Amino acid sequence: MLTVVDADFLVKQYLGDTPRANHSRFVAHIMRELAPTFSASADLWEVVGLCHDLDYFHTSNNWSQHGLVTVSWLGDNIPVEAQHAIAAHDHRTGVQADTALADVLKTADAVAVIDERLGRAAILDADRTDSYAALRRQLG
């Protein structure tokens, strides 16, 4: 079975030192943090997060294969449920997976994209602004 260390090595191998590698690591972090909520293996969920975009550059000219190529590369080194989650994380493949792992991967992927587009500083500023407004309401 693929370990977190192995998966991070694959991120370095396939994604290098790119924003897509950072994206995958952020998704993996979210996945690891959420796994206990679903009584799931934090290591497995982190591996799925790390690996979900390994084929990103390889499939950039045919997004209908995005995730499917990664699954073919990983083979039996990850469980079937993890294979299905990776294969289904991009709607353009047409693959459907209805498990907590697949749903959380799609959600974490979307959160990471939003984080990239808005910038973490913008999100933190919005949170501080909301907190400040709530405090002002409490103080009258």
Image (cartoon, helix red, strand yellow):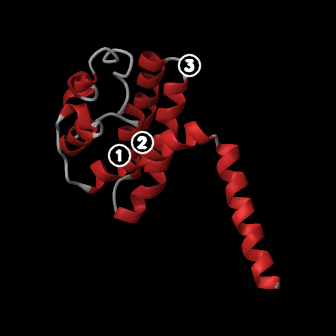
Q: How far apart are marks 2 and 3 (CA)?
A: 19 Å
Quarter occupied by the N terminus: top left
The CA distance from mark 2 to mark 1 is: 5 Å
Give the amino acid at mark 2: Asp
Whether residue 107 is visible here, answered yes or no, is yes
Which residue is under mark 2? Answer: 109
Judged by depth in the image, the label closer to the viewer, 1 or 3, is 1
Picture coordinates of residue 7, whole percent (x, y): 40, 30
Q: In this view, does 66 lie above or below 99?
A: above
**First in sequence: mark 1 or mark 3?**
3
Identify residue for label 1: 106
> Which is more toward the observer, 60 or 35?
60
Rendering coords of residue 11 (x, y %)? 44, 24
> Residue 76 is drawn in which quadrant?
top left
Residue 44 lies in quadrant: top left
Give the spatial CA distance, label 1 vs label 3: 23 Å
Give the SS element for disc 1: helix
Q: Is mark 3 on a helix, strand or loop?
A: loop
> Callout 1 environment at 10 Å: few (<14), some (14 to 19), or many (20+)?
many
User: Can you identify the residue that label 3 sits on?
Assistant: 17
